[in-house]
Amino acid sequence: MHSEAAKSLGITDGKIAAVSYWQTSIEFSDKERAALAMTIVSPILKTKGCQMTYTAPSMNFSASKKSPS
């Protein structure tokens, strides 16, 4: 289901297949890995509030590209 939506947005089959090992895959740029990392830590931050975990990945994005909390 999500892979069909991803394909419709132009995401390659290689990236879709590599999502499970995104941290080490050459399919993703540093910016894409930062975005994936933020999707994992965002829920943690809301409950635990570890700012350092959020700061490093968020440096890859301008304020206008970040989602509002």
Image (cartoon, rainbow, N blue to C red):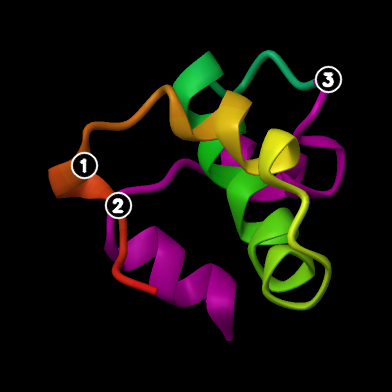
Q: Earlier in the sequence, mark 3 or mark 1?
A: 3
Q: Residue at x 40, y 23 (%)?
A: 60
The Cα atoms of the two marked residues, 2 and 3, are separated by 24 Å
Q: Residue at x 73, y 56 (%)?
A: 41
Q: Secondary structure at mark 2?
A: loop
Picture coordinates of residue 65, whole percent (x, y): 21, 46
**Amino acid type of the residue tagged 1 in the rendering:** Ala
The Cα atoms of the two marked residues, 3 and 1, are separated by 26 Å
Residue 63 numbered mark, or none: 1
Above or below, 39 relative to 64: below
From the viewer's side, name the closer residue of 30 and 58: 58
Circle 2 Cα neighbour tier, 10 Å, few/some/many (<14 / 14–19 / ≥20): few
Picture coordinates of residue 25, whole percent (x, y): 76, 21
Asked if residue 43 lies left or right of residue 63, the reply is right
Q: Secondary structure at mark 3?
A: loop
- Disc 2 and disc 1 in contact, CB within 8 angstroms: yes
Residue 24 numbered mark, or none: 3
Front: mark 2 or 3: 2
Q: Secondary structure at mark 1?
A: helix
Picture coordinates of residue 63, whole percent (x, y): 21, 42
Give the residue at mark 2.
66
From the viewer's side, name the closer residue of 67 and 4: 67
The Cα atoms of the two marked residues, 2 and 1, are separated by 5 Å
- Disc 3 and disc 1 in contact, CB within 8 angstroms: no
Quadrant showing the N terminus: bottom right
Tell me which segment is drawn in magenta.
Answer: 1-24
Circle 3 Cα neighbour tier, 10 Å, few/some/many (<14 / 14–19 / ≥20): few
